[in-house]
Image (cartoon, grey):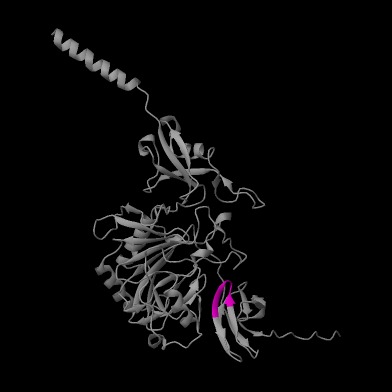
Amino acid sequence: MLGLRRLLSCVLLVATASVGAAVSPVTVTVFNNGESVGGVQVQLTPEHVISGKHLAEYFSTLIEVDGVYTDESKTSSNAVADRVFTASGKAVHSFDDVAANDQLYLVPTDLLFVWPFVEFGHRVAIDSAQSPTGKPIILESFSDSPRVFKIHDFFSNDEADQLVKRISEIDDDVNKLKRSTVGHDDKGSESSVRTSENAFDSVSPVAVSLMKRSFDLLNIGPYQENMADGLQLLRYKQKQAYIPHNDWFDKGVTPDFNWDPKDRGANRFATVFLYLSNVTRGGQTVFPHADMPTGIDHAMPPSEDEMAIFEKGTWEYKMVKQCYSKMASYPRKTAAVLFYHQKGNGELDALAEHGGGPVLEGTKWAANLWVWNRDRNGPEGSPINVDFVNNRDVPIVLFWSTTQMAELAPGQKINFASFGKHTWTFKDEAGHDLFTHTLNYKGGPVQTITMPPVVEPPKDEL
């Protein structure tokens, strides 16, 4: 009996000592959303992590958080974070979610989490209930600026085949396969510098699963239909391509809608791009403002014989050169890439400009999902049928906002469907602005814009 009492006393003493013992602090490094440099080392105790929001607010007193504008003059973006994430994308809610030497990331109010680059080749495993294999999705860092990741185990061969089959089955006028367009709504314009064909699928089981999977990949919460454009299905045949462009819309494209995420507006946040087939030659996704990472080589550039399918000096000919000299992702069936259009502080990233390289041999089947930072529903209006005419004796280049739409030879006319308050610019071949015109519904449903502009003489007063 005495032995039992002594044993119980020892157990009680150990338990009491455990309860009273102080938990050792842990040292972590805190970064701004999506950043891999400029971190601040901080010692944490359980008192700092009453909740994730409490921790975010505490960190905001130690590090200058760069977020949305916090004043009416739009000169200050010194914000307060309301979420904290680990490098594996896990939201921090308690002290148990943090380990010694962790890297933690502060996400400001009104912004979405952005995966940090960390270093080339860095990998993160992401769980998704939508995974066709049951294995985690692997996100591999490829470029810091622009922010590009390779995605492994994102979708299967069978899903790729289903999507290619689905492209030919869609028969409604809005979503069926047809010449690709550009623009901010479902009435976009055809462009001579986007020659691919596309369809949209937002209803098939495989499309819905991939859209939900993309939100899991981005770590931004459950799929929301109003934060995505639908799964775009693409076919590029030989010679077809899409000139380098940004997926985000210029902040001034329609003045009656707030396109600036840094001012709590809505715009495209990221693209998840899927390769549904192998391509014999060409068809890269090229990022012309970045070089290939050190140690990653291009395929052998095409010979002059291979290039003979393009006329020298055309944008397609020039773009092939870019595809074999600048940073590029090569098409391979079931491969995928993620690239961001917004930085972690809400700024639109001009370096995210990219293009679909000309296919030299074979057919490229692909799909992509544009994800927005918030509700994408923008302004609506009736289309305006516009003829653009080059009356000069030298070629000119036509732009809608910041996107090149066409090259017009002397005397050439081209037609686009556009909308009120859309801004179009004629430029010379050196890129100098010649004439800018903003469409107005007062001009009627059919309009003509010429270069040089036609100036109507003043009417005589009665």
Which residue is at the front of the view, 379 or 398?
398
Q: Quadrant of the N terminus?
A: top left
Q: x and y percent of residue 5 in the render?
A: 18, 10
Q: x and y percent of residue 142 in the render?
A: 39, 60
Residue 48, relative to residue 316: is it above or below?
A: above
Residue at 66 percent across and 85 percent down: it is 451
Residue 106, relative to residue 379: is it above or below?
A: above
Quadrant housing residue 197: bottom left
Residue at 38 percent across and 35 percent down: it is 95
Q: Quadrant of the C terminus?
A: bottom right
Q: x and y percent of residue 435 in the render?
A: 67, 78
Residue at 45 percent across and 58 percent down: it is 144
Q: Is residue 144 left or right of residue 426?
A: left
Which residue is at the front of the view, 214 or 352?
352
From where the camera sits, is residue 180 visible? no
Quadrant housing residue 45: top left
Residue 317, relative to residue 344: is it above or below?
A: below
Q: Which residues fall within the magenta stretch?
A: 399-405
Residue 32, relative to residue 191: is it above or below?
A: above
Main secondary-structure element of the magenta-colored stretch? strand
